[in-house]
């Protein structure tokens, strides 16, 4: 009799756990499935997510958080994430999970609007989005580029092709040093560059007291 009672309790707990998981899944999946984006919005979402994952060299199970985008896109600032939706906003605090801080697709569309407004760049074409992604990927120490209405003037005539190609391949363009970080040797060879498989993360900061011990693949052009 006692054994049957224990089995009943265990089954009840299992059923409760399954119901809870299904509820959480419904909270997170349903809103995103209804998202309908413009071509340029989808291009930005795919671009910034792809760059972030490539530069993190990881794929977080829950998704990408604000801090991860800031880490992989140096020109992003905290204010760019105002009104940016996360999965925690969708459940009205009824359910708390480790995915609460993950930025939703709608959140990335708001991020596009915020950054384009701050940097005063257009977002009418995919070329415009490429230019915005280039700006967001540049290190804060680099000289700001001229953000006019055309893609060509945003990047500069001499480095336009290299900059776009670097970012499209998942790299980070350093305009001041004419370098493409986190890029493959094959890409570097195609651009007739000088590939360094294991450069220092602090190579442009000779006075740095502390530097992370990591290899940064770099193509010098």
Image (cartoon, grey):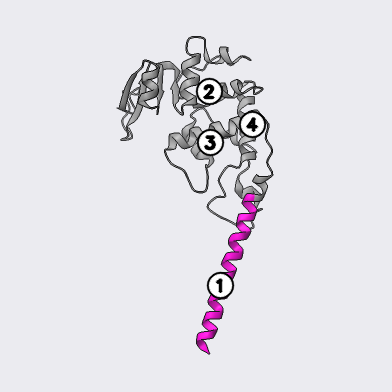
Question: Disc 2, disc 4: CB below 8 Å?
Answer: no
Magenta residues, start to end: 1-29
Query: 70 or 39: nearer the eye?
Result: 39
The CA distance from mark 2 to mark 1 is: 51 Å
Residue 17, image quadrant: bottom right
Q: Where does the image place residue 166, in percent across and percent down from the top left?
A: 46, 22
Of the two numbered discs 2 and 1 in the rendering, the one whose residue sits closer to the viewer: 1
Residue at numbered disc 2 = 135
Question: 42 and 88: which one is in front?
Answer: 42
Q: Earlier in the sequence, mark 3 or mark 1?
A: 1
Q: Is residue 26 magenta?
A: yes
Q: Earlier in the sequence, mark 2 or mark 1?
A: 1
Q: Comparing marks 2 and 4, which lies closer to the viewer? A: 4
Q: Position of residue 82 (x, y in %)?
A: 62, 36
Gap between marks 4 and 1 measured at Cα: 43 Å
**Mark drawn on residue 13:** 1
Q: CA distance from mark 2 to mark 4?
A: 17 Å
Q: Which mark is residue 41?
A: 4
Label 2 vs 3, first from the N-terminus:
3
Quadrant in which residue 149 is drawn = top right
Crowding at dot 4, Cα within 10 Å, few <14 / some 14-19 / many 20+, comes out as many
Q: Which residue is mark 3?
A: 49
Q: Secondary structure at mark 2?
A: helix
Quarter of the figure that contains the C terminus: top left
């Amino acid at each position: 009799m006692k054994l049957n009672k224990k089995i009943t309790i265990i089954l009840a707990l299992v059923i409760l756990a399954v119901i809870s998981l299904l509820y959480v899944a419904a909270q997170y999946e349903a809103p995103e499935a209804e998202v309908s984006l413009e071509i340029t919005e989808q291009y930005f979402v795919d671009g910034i997510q792809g760059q972030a994952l490539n530069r993190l060299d990881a794929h977080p199970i829950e998704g990408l958080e604000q801090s991860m985008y800031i880490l992989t896109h140096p020109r992003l600032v905290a204010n760019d994430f105002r009104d940016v939706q996360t999965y925690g906003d969708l459940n009205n605090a009824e359910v708390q999970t480790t995915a609460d801080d993950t930025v939703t697709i709608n959140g990335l569309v708001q991020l596009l609007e915020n950054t384009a407004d701050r940097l005063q760049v257009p977002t009418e074409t995919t070329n415009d989005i490429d230019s915005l992604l280039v700006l967001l990927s540049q290190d804060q120490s680099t000289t700001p580029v001229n953000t006019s209405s055309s893609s060509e003037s945003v990047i500069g005539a001499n480095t336009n092709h290299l900059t776009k190609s670097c970012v499209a391949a998942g790299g980070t363009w350093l305009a001041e040093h004419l370098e493409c970080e986190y890029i493959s040797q094959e890409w570097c060879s195609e651009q007739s560059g000088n590939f360094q498989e294991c450069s220092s993360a602090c190579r442009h900061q000779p006075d740095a007291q502390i530097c992370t011990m990591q290899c940064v693949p770099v193509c010098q052009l």
